[in-house]
């Protein structure tokens, strides 16, 4: 079973790069360019993880965190930002995000964090092979 990841970003090129990084993993990656589109997609499909930029065209990562909490299943939220410092990381985790990823994306780190988020005990039936 493939894990589902929703990438929320106003940058189409980042979505293409991320898709290439994850190509060999059993994950399905969808892209939403704004919060409104992400809301519609989350109502249509169940996702294991939402990877969101800290700042999106019509909101921010906290809006995404609240949106994910409205989903029927447990959805992990991972925040990505060019200024991913220790203070932001601590804030994100304290408010309920799964993790924080720095941009530009570093492929081994992206794969590790997404692998771990998709491999949580709740998702064992969709367990990913070792990296």
Image (cartoon, rainbow, N blue to C red):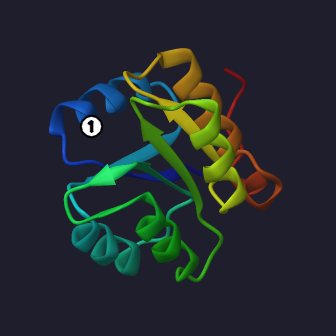
Q: Position of residue 14 (x, y in %)?
A: 26, 32
Q: Across the whole image, how many numbered discs are drawn on residues?
A: 1
Can residue 118 be seen here? The reply is: no
Q: For residue 109, what is the image quadrant? A: top right
Q: Position of residue 104 (x, y in %)?
A: 37, 21
Question: Which residue matches tag 1?
Answer: 15
Of all residues, the one furthest to the right in this rendering is 121
Q: Residue at x 20, y 55 (%)?
A: 33
Looking at this view, is 98 or 74 the one in front? 98
Q: Is residue 28 visible?
A: yes
With respect to residue 28, does 105 lie above or below?
above
Q: Is residue 108 left or right of residue 43?
A: right
Q: Secondary structure at mark 1?
A: helix
User: In the image, is 96 to the left or to the right of 10?
Assistant: right
Callout 1: 10 Å neighbours few (<14), some, many (20+)?
many
Q: Which residue is at 70% across, 38% downward?
A: 116
């Amino acid at each position: 079973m493939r894990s589902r990841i929703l990438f929320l970003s106003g940058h189409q090129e980042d979505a293409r790069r991320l898709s290439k990084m994850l190509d060999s993993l059993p994950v399905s990656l969808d892209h939403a360019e704004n919060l409104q589109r992400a809301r519609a997609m989350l109502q249509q499909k169940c996702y294991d993880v939402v990877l969101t930029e800290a700042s999106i065209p019509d909101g921010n990562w906290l809006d995404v965190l609240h949106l994910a909490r409205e989903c029927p299943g447990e959805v992990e939220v991972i925040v990505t930002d060019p200024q991913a410092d220790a203070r932001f990381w601590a804030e994100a985790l304290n408010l309920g995000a799964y993790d924080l990823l720095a941009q530009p994306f570093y492929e081994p780190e992206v794969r590790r964090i997404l692998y771990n988020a998709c491999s949580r005990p709740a998702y064992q039936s969709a367990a990913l092979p070792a990296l």
